[in-house]
Amino acid sequence: MKTRNPSGLIAEYPEDYKFSSARFYFDGSDEFNLVTHYKG
């Protein structure tokens, strides 16, 4: 379930912001190949 960004200034949803790790935790995608899951 998506949660709206209350300010909505950068992206409507946190996982829609291109440089956010939220996309990685939402669907596992890592466009820049930089993110590591906090559980290892």
Image: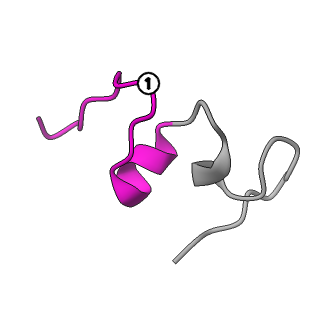
Q: Mark 1 points at which residue?
A: 32
Residue under the point 66% across and 42% down: 17
Residue under the point 85% across and 51% down: 7
Question: Label 1's element?
Answer: loop
Above or below, 36 against 26 in this view is above
Q: Give, as a single range, the part of the protein colored magenta.
A: 21-40
For the stretch drawn in magenta, the main secondary structure is loop
Residue under the point 39% across and 37% down: 30
Above or below, 37 against 5 in this view is above
Q: Quadrant where the C terminus lies?
A: top left
Can you give x and y, in whole percent of width and height, for residue 20 in the image? 56, 36
Which amino acid, mark 1?
Answer: Phe
Q: Is 22 in front, or is 18?
A: 18
Residue that lies at the very extreme toward the front in this rendered image: 31
Residue that lies at the very extreme toward the left in this rendered image: 40
Above or below, 26 against 35 in this view is below
Q: Which colour scheme is used?
A: one colour
Can you give x and y, in whole percent of width and height, for residue 27 in the image? 38, 58
Above or below, 16 against 34 in this view is below
Q: In this view, does 35 lie to the left or right of 6?
A: left
Can you give x and y, in whole percent of width and height, for residue 25 in the image? 37, 51
Residue 37 position by quadrant: top left
Q: What is the tally of numbered marks visible in this picture? A: 1
Label 1 crowding class (10 Å Cα cut-off): few <14, some 14-19, many 20+?
Answer: few
Residue under the point 25% across and 30% down: 36
Can you give x and y, in whole percent of width and height, for residue 5 in the image? 74, 57
Q: Is residue 26 left or right of residue 28?
A: right
Q: In this view, does 11 lie to the left or right of 19?
A: right
Residue 2 position by quadrant: bottom right
